[in-house]
Amino acid sequence: MSGPSRGNEALRAAQRERILRAAETLLVTHGVERSRLRDVSEAAGVSIGTVQHYFDTRDRLIAELFEWSSQRRLEAWQSAAPDGGEPWSRIVALLYASLPDPLLWRSRIWIEFCAMARDEELRSKLDRHYDAWRPPFREAIEAGIQLGVFHPVMPVADVVDLFIIFGDGASVGISLAAPGIDGEMLRRLLIETARVALGVAADLPTPPPPSPPR
């Protein structure tokens, strides 16, 4: 590929991401109903024609925004606990990463996407997203069972879904700014719930939170 072609491709990718970032910000601050293509173009500092070049309709923009935003979060979450580590440390790292900072921002994005899940395409994307969250939890739990560290009080699949449901519920409380609910409290409750659900010995210490990415 020639130099100019690579440069143009990089420029298009950067411009597309700029539009998606602007759309994400509008979605969080104003909600989907007030996030029109014209609003996105103004926030991104590009013409509405440029926005339509990449996303011909608002529905297409929202669908691709979900894919882009969810994939970024999923990749960051998966990298929080690479395979091969001590199982309890992996579980704790995954649980902390399930409620990332800035938590309010992420929670509002997720709530907006879930509210739009009546759309068949977005619903399908949402289902695939849930499916992608399950394997790292399941693999860490099964490794802990093999080592005799975990003694789940329910089937592994149910424990995994419990963690995912907890994360969804936490998103609702955070996005509504419910009294008494904050990230630190939710993370503590999630770790304590995991300890009980996995039958973790009381004398097995809880690892410290992972360092934030640089």
Image: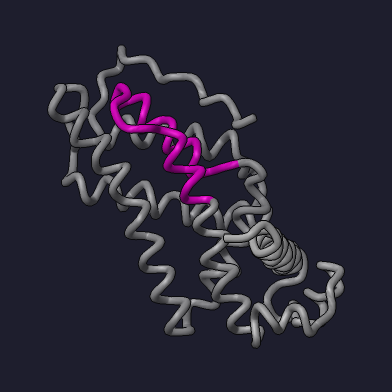
* Residue for point 62% across, 60% down: 2
* Residue for point 86% across, 73% down: 42
Task: Indicate the position of residue 31 as horizontal and vertical percent values.
Answer: 70, 72
Q: How is the image coloured?
A: one colour
> What range of the chain is rendered magenta?
73-100
Asked if the magenta segment contains residue 174, the reply would be: no
Comparing 34 with 77, the one in front is 77
* Residue for point 43% across, 19% down: 207
- Judged from this view, the residue extending furthest toward the top is 203
Is residue 111 something one can see in this rendering? Answer: yes
Vertical side of 76 occupied by 60: above or below: below
Task: Indicate the position of residue 134 as horizontal and vertical percent values.
Answer: 31, 51
Task: Indicate the position of residue 154 as horizontal and vertical percent values.
Answer: 18, 44
Q: Quadrant of the C terminus?
A: top right
What main secondary structure does the magenta stretch of the protein show?
helix
- 149 left or right, relative to 119: left
Is residue 24 something one can see in this rendering? Answer: no
Task: Indicate the position of residue 189 as horizontal and vertical percent values.
Answer: 46, 36
Vertical side of 166 occupied by 191: above or below: above
Classify residue 1 by image quadrant.
Answer: bottom right
Vertical side of 170 occupied by 79: above or below: above
Asked if the magenta segment contains residue 84, the reply would be: yes
